[in-house]
Image (spheres, rainbow, N blue to C red):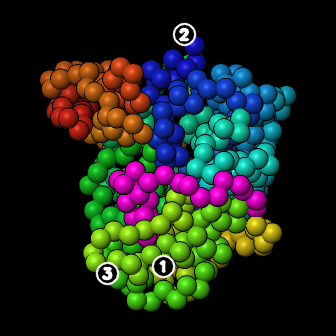
């Protein structure tokens, strides 16, 4: 069995948040494979912890990926500030065709377009993917899972950071399907009476008032903050209020565009023009424009650049969704040339932390080597790009650790699921499989 099939059967997907089934990437051809270890979301530390503790597995997964796609170059992109992780990865790379590329401590260093340019000097075509310029990019946890798949071990656990207003910030390993509330409890619980949660990060994550939901293959972290926190207050505003504020207050200062990392790379992304389109929504009909098409949703425009605390990122999100529904494709400029001020406009993480009012929560979140052991898990059938997996088990069945419990529809883009521990199947629906530990 070749690596592509091993990875497909193991259910490996992009663990950094994208969730794209990894076997599809490994079936392509490229000359370079890049490990994305930038991890630039404030307060999250799981990639740095994995690079420090499992550097050999990261490099082995990278080497296997290179072999699968026919690449001659392997690169690990990692921030220079993570000194222990850098040392571990450099030692693991010795004698291999893999090299370390040190990145600055700015946001968003982990954006795929930015990372590819920084490590190879190449620019991905507008609206394109790294494969078009001969590169494959994978999160470091994905590479660890590739190495595990080659050894016959499927994806059954997830590493994530729990930080913010908790008693003991930490990075933990949990079975897939673990309730997020159990993860927060493992970090000592919230220290504020009415917490709100940023699932996946402050900048690009999802803000929720409840965490009664399961961990998936793409969950990177949970940040707990008080409801009164300024950023959480802003994020919880309904879209209709965000748009109304933008329509009345945006003065077209262009700061949102001038700090946009994709704009500075030379792509035709101009959030201020998307904000301008709010003025044409008086009829109630959706009216947006194409300047949002290549927005990477990093959130810098909303949470750092805008002096009036408006919502250009959210306007871009709505614009992209509206254009997708309407079948509108990008038809603007296709040439890319980095802005001459790009280097000078990068946003340091420390500056971003100050703007986000996160200084009091900037604590280490060390890796707890003992995996959490919940009594029950809920495995969502769709925790990846593509279509849902389908159940291979029925209520009342008993399964062993690592046993496949959900498969991939023939010819579809999806990822298999496996039992994280020996269990009884308590429930099977068209959405999820519930397992109770034996």
Q: Position of residue 416 (x, y in %)?
A: 38, 27
Q: Position of residue 146 (x, y in %)?
A: 57, 28
- Residue at (51, 17) in percent of width and height: 5
Sequence-first tag of 2 and 3? 2
Sequence-first tag of 3 and 1? 1
Question: Which one is closest to the eye, mark 1 or mark 2?
Answer: 1
Magenta part of the chain: 314-338
Q: Residues within 10 Å of mark 1 (few under 14, many from 20)?
A: some
As drawn, 145 above or below 327: above
- Residue at (26, 55) in percent of width and height: 212
Sequence-first tag of 1 and 2? 2
Which SS class for mark 2? loop
Q: Nearer the viewer, residue 271 or 168?
A: 271
Left or right: 431, with 419 as reference point: left
Q: Are marks 2 and 3 in contact (CB under 8 Å)?
A: no
- Residue extending furthest right? 95
As drawn, 348 above or below 247: above
Q: Which mark is residue 1?
A: 2
- Residue at (67, 26) in percent of width and height: 29
Q: Residues within 10 Å of mark 3 (few under 14, many from 20)?
A: few
Looking at the rendering, in which quadrant would you find the N terminus? top right
In this figure, which residue is indicated by the disc labeled 1? 276
Which SS class for mark 3? loop
Question: Is 335 colored magenta in this rendering?
Answer: yes
Question: Which one is closest to the eye, mark 2 or mark 3?
Answer: 3
In this figure, which residue is indicated by the disc labeled 3? 282
As drawn, 414 above or below 14: above
Q: CA distance from mark 1 to mark 2?
A: 54 Å
Total residue callouts:
3
- Residue extending furthest top? 1
């Amino acid at each position: 069995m070749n690596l592509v099939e091993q990875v497909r059967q193991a259910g490996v997907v992009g663990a950094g948040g994208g969730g794209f089934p990894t076997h599809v990437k490994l079936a392509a051809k490229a000359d370079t494979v890049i490990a994305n270890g930038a991890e630039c979301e404030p307060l999250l530390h799981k990639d740095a912890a994995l690079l420090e503790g499992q550097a050999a597995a990261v490099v082995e997964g990278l080497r296997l990926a290179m072999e699968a796609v026919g690449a001659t170059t392997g690169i690990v992109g990692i921030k220079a500030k993570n000194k222990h992780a850098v040392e571990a990865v450099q030692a693991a790379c010795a004698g291999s065709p893999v090299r370390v590329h040190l990145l600055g401590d700015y946001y968003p260093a982990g954006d795929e377009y930015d990372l590819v340019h920084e490590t190879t000097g190449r620019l991905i075509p507008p609206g394109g993917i790294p494969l078009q310029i001969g590169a494959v990019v994978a999160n470091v946890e994905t590479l660890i899972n590739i190495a595990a798949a080659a050894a016959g071990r499927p994806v059954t656990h997830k590493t994530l950071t729990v930080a913010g207003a908790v008693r003991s910030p930490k990075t933990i390993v949990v079975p897939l399907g673990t309730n997020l509330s159990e993860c927060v409890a493992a970090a000592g619980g919230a220290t504020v009476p009415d917490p709100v949660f940023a699932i996946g990060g402050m900048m690009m994550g999802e803000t929720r008032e409840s965490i009664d939901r399961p961990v998936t293959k793409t969950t990177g972290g949970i940040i707990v903050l008080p409801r009164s926190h300024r950023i959480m207050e802003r994020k919880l505003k309904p879209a209709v209020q965000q748009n109304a504020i933008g329509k009345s207050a945006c003065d077209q200062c262009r700061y949102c565009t001038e700090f946009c990392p994709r704009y500075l790379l030379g792509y035709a992304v101009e959030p201020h023009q998307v904000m301008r389109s709010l003025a044409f929504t008086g009829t109630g009909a959706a009216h947006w424009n194409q300047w949002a098409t290549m927005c990477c949703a990093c959130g810098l425009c909303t949470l750092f650049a805008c002096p009036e605390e408006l919502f250009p990122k959210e306007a871009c999100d709505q614009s992209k969704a509206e254009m997708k529904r309407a079948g509108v494709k990008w038809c603007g400029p296709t040439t890319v040339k980095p802005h001459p001020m790009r280097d000078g406009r990068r946003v340091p993480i420390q500056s971003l932390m100050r703007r986000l009012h996160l200084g009091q929560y900037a604590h280490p979140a060390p890796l707890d080597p003992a995996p959490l052991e919940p009594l029950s898990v809920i495995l969502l059938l769709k925790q990846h790009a593509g279509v849902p997996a389908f159940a291979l088990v029925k209520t009342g069945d008993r399964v062993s650790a690592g046993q496949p419990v959900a498969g991939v529809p023939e010819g579809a883009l999806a990822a298999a699921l496996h039992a994280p521990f020996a269990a009884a199947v308590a429930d099977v629906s068209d959405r999820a499989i519930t397992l109770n530990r034996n």
